[in-house]
Amino acid sequence: MLRVKKHRLVVADFQSAYDWYETKQHGLGADFIDDFRLTYQRLRRSPDLYSVRSANVRRLNCNAFLMEFYVVTPAEIRVPALLHASRDTENILVARRRIFKEA
């Protein structure tokens, strides 16, 4: 099983999503966490299952909540972002992948 390397802002993405869902309805943040755990398990088990969208980036949808973007390399799964579809995903991913290349 490949190890997962997350961009340093993924934790902030996660917290922001949790906070947003929780402000919409109490308990929805917990539903988001449960959905994320299941999605993360799918990613770890079958990273190649999801098709490449652009620039070698794959997208895994977390049911009704958000999208997890990732890149599979021979050594690891790199997760540059957890984003909602309403965000400017393309520009965010370009900026974050640049940082991964420098690391």
Image (spheres, helix red, strand yellow):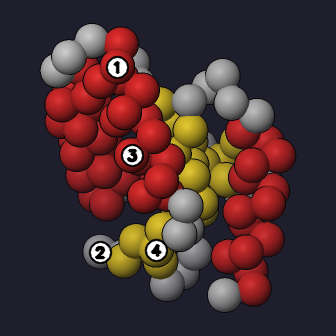
- Badge 3, how many Cα within 10 Å: few under 14, some, many 20+? some
Which residue shows up at 66% across the image and 22% down it? 86
Residue that mark 3 sits on: 15
Mark 2 to mark 3 CA distance (whole Å): 26 Å
Residue 1's disc is 2
Q: Foreground mark, 2 or 1?
A: 1
Three-letter amino acid code of the residue under disc 1: Thr
SS for tag 2? Answer: loop
Residue beneath the point at 47% across and 30% down: 66
Sequence-wise, the earlier of marks 1 and 3 is 3
**Residue 45, position as x, y percentages in the image:** 28, 58
The amino acid at mark 3 is Gln
- Residue 83 image offset from top left, x and y in percent: 56, 38
What element does badge 4 sit on? Answer: strand
Q: Nearer the viewer, mark 4 or mark 1?
A: 1
Q: Is residue 41 above or below residue 72?
A: above
- Between circles 2 and 4, the one closer to the viewer is 4
Q: Is residue 84 left or right of residue 45?
A: right
Q: Foreground mark, 3 or 4?
A: 3
Residue at horizontal 31 percent and vertical 50 percent from the top: 40
Q: Is residue 31 visible?
A: yes
Q: CA distance from mark 2 to mark 1?
A: 36 Å
Q: Crowding at label 2, few (<14), some or many (≥20) Cα neighbours within 10 Å?
A: few
Q: Earlier in the sequence, mark 2 or mark 3?
A: 2
Amino acid at dot 2: Met
SS of the residue under disc 3 = helix
Residue 39's quadrant in the figure? top left
**Which label was assigned to residue 5?**
4
Q: Label 1 belongs to which residue?
A: 23
Which tag, 3 or 4, sits closer to the chain's start? 4
